Image (cartoon, grey):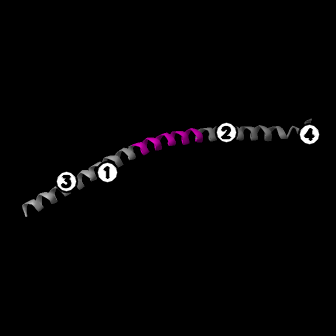
Amino acid sequence: MEEFAWLLPAIVTAAAAWGGVRQGMNGQRETIERLGTVLDRVGTKVDAHAERIAAIEADKDNLKELIRNVEKRRA
């Protein structure tokens, strides 16, 4: 048994390293989940802005058409 005593520090060190790796992986998993939540919110905001921009562009086109019609009537 004494001949394997030298392995004990190596095993303890490896176990501690593995524990650190697992903890780091769990931290990364949480970070990735938070990033996913943030990206979902940003995507929702971008979609809302895109809808507003599309509505403004449609209004702009309608106003241009109205101006052209008024100008044609004056001519």
Q: Quadrant of the N terminus?
A: top right
Q: Earlier in the sequence, mark 4 or mark 2?
A: 4
Q: Residue furthest bottom?
A: 75
Secondary element under disc 4, as helix, strand or loop, is helix
User: Is residue 46 positioned above or below 23 on the image?
Assistant: below
**Alpha-carbon span between mark 4 and mark 1:** 77 Å
In this rendered view, identify the residue nearer to me: 37 or 5: 37
Q: Which residues are magenta?
A: 28-44
Q: Amino acid at mark 2?
A: Arg
**Amino acid type at mark 4:** Glu
Going 43% across and 45% down the picture, which residue do you hit?
A: 43
**Tag nearer the camera, 4 or 1:** 1
Say if the magenta span includes residue 43. Answer: yes
Numbered disc 1: secondary structure:
helix
- Say which quarter of the image contains residue 31: top right
Residue 58: in magenta span = no
Q: Earlier in the sequence, mark 2 or mark 1?
A: 2
Q: CA distance from mark 3 to mark 4?
A: 91 Å
